[in-house]
């Protein structure tokens, strides 16, 4: 397992981070011997500010622009 983690570091798949927006990972070997990376965004969730406005309903947005001739952002 340590060798696989070192290999991931060398290949820049994973890296150490001191960012407040980090996502911690766990490397797990499954029963069929496949390596799996599981992420836990606790650090990211702790620094995220909740949005007071809920997201719009995508169907309503698409209906609103369905007849538009031009789109702009």
Image (tube, rainbow, N blue to C red):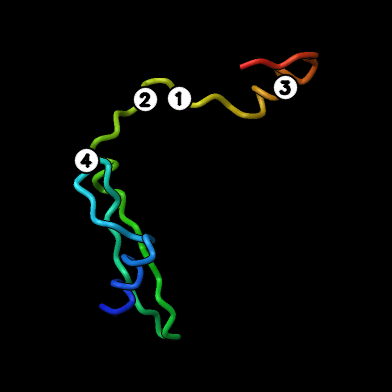
What is the x, y in percent for residue 20?
A: 21, 40
Q: Residue at x 26, y 48 (%)?
A: 42
Q: Residue at x 37, y 60 (%)?
A: 12
Q: Which residue is mark 2?
A: 51
Q: Which residue is mark 1?
A: 54
Q: Is residue 30 left or right of residue 18?
A: right
- Which is in the foreground here, disc 4 or disc 1? 4
On screen, residue 62 above or below 25: above
What is the x, y in percent for residue 60?
A: 65, 23
Marked residue nearer the N-terminal end (4 or 1): 4
Callout 3 secondary element? helix
What is the x, y in percent for residue 65?
A: 72, 18
On screen, residue 67 above or below 24: above
- Which is in the foreground here, disc 3 or disc 4? 4
Image quadrant in which you'd find residue 37? bottom left
Q: Is residue 58 left or right of residue 68?
A: left
Q: Which residue is mark 3?
A: 63
Given contact means CB atoms under 8 Å apart, are the residues at marks 1 and 2 in contact? yes
**Cα–Cα gap, marks 2 and 3:** 24 Å
Marked residue nearer the N-terminal end (3 or 1): 1
Q: Which mark is residue 20?
A: 4
- Which is in the foreground here, disc 4 or disc 2? 4
């Amino acid at each position: 397992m340590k060798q696989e983690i070192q290999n991931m570091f060398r290949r820049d798949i994973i890296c150490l981070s001191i960012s407040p927006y980090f996502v911690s990972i766990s490397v797990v070997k499954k029963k069929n011997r496949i390596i799996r990376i599981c992420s836990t965004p606790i650090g990211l969730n702790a620094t995220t500010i909740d949005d007071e406005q809920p997201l719009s309903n995508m169907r309503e947005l698409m209906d609103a622009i369905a007849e538009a001739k031009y789109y702009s952002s």
